[in-house]
Amino acid sequence: MRFQRLDLNLLVALDVLLEERSVSLAADRLCLSQSATSSALGRLRDYFEDDLLVLKGRQMILTPRAEELIEPVHAVLEQIRTTIAVAPEFDPATCDRQIRIMASDYTCEVLLTDVINGLANKAPYMRFEIQGMGSKPIDSLERGMIDLIVSVDFSLSSDHPSEVLFDDGYIIVGDANNEAVKAGIDSKQYFTMDHVTTRFGRSRVPAFEDWFLRKQKQTRHVAVVAPSFMSVPGYLIGTRRIATMHRKLADRLVQYLPLSTCPVPFDIPPIREAVQWHITSKNDHAIQWVLGELRIFTQEQLGKVGQKEYDDHGRILVEFEANREASHPA
């Protein structure tokens, strides 16, 4: 590689020549022949327009210009070694980075809030920006607008690495005084009741349960379309409406809201929540560390991904084709 007519490989030779002040000793250290080292010295003399090393008696001494070059040449090579040749050790305790994550409010509630709050002591200088699910999350990842996407696995791209974190089933949720929910809802009753669902963004991307029922050609009466998963309970409390909600989210909400739950009266496949990062981030220590923390939390708190619902290729064992162009923000 050349920089302003200088072959940068010659800097290594120059550093050793300035230290050893001997062509033969420098050749030994560089593992070069004496003639090759002399040739390198000749090219350095041409570039700097200075003899650099001159023979005085039986010893070689440095010219004033060579003396001036000792420290800067050594410093440049040391900087290259520490910043390029040797990967710096990652320390979360001192890392000052912003990590941008695109995720739905469901993902924030059941995963990201706990994980990020738990990192406050481990990585006190690390900053996080959570962006709501857009209509083109992969485009945002590829344009460098975000570092991670957490969403259902089939909405992610095969062009970048991803990893399934956990799976989640569905449950019916209604007001705590909703007698139908407390008694249990059968399939016929389900499709006659008023429902609350969610759709997102300008393109009105449906939530997975809404999309799945449409694919099954099942019609239900949607009384309210909410803008987010966390806004759904507000349209249930004090009414007879119901919502088909992620079980992990429902389990959290019933702890502090007047809600009740009952099983969904038909088979609906679970979602698999996955995280995706840009292919160029595989050696980004900060991003990989955050991925590790997500992995640890989901294994310890949210359970391992279920296996019996999936075939040998990781596909859900139901006869439906996921629309990979849609980005269901679960």
Image: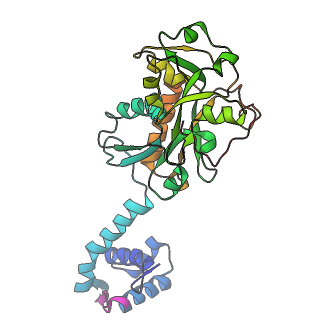
105 is higher (above) or lower (below) than 304? below
Q: Is residue 322 visible?
A: yes
Which corner quadrant holds the C terminus?
top right
Residue located at (61% from left, 10% from top): 184
> At which x and y percent is residue 46?
38, 92
Seen at 37% across and 78% down, the residue is 14
Q: How many marks?
A: 0
Looking at the image, residue 67 lies above or below residue 183? below
Q: Position of residue 321 (x, y in %)?
A: 73, 40
Tell me which segment is drawn in magenta.
47-57
Is 48 magenta? The answer is yes
Q: Is residue 245 visible?
A: no
For the residue pair 224 and 271, the one nearer the viewer reads as: 224
Residue 245 lies, in percent from the top left, at 55, 25
**In the image shown, does 14 or 109 lie closer to the viewer?**
109
Establish if 140 lies above or below 219. Answer: below
Residue 216 is covered by the magenta coloring: no
Residue 144's x, y, as percent?
Answer: 46, 57
Left or right: 320, with 54 as reference point: right
Q: Could you say which quadrant of the image residue 8 lies in?
A: bottom left
- 15 relative to 34 in the view: left or right: left
Q: Is residue 175 left or right of residue 323?
A: left
- Image check: 96 left or right of 290? left
Residues 294 and 28: in front is 294
Q: Which quadrant holds residue 60?
A: bottom left
Q: Nearer the viewer, residue 165 or 325?
A: 325
Q: Residue at x 35, y 74 (%)?
A: 15
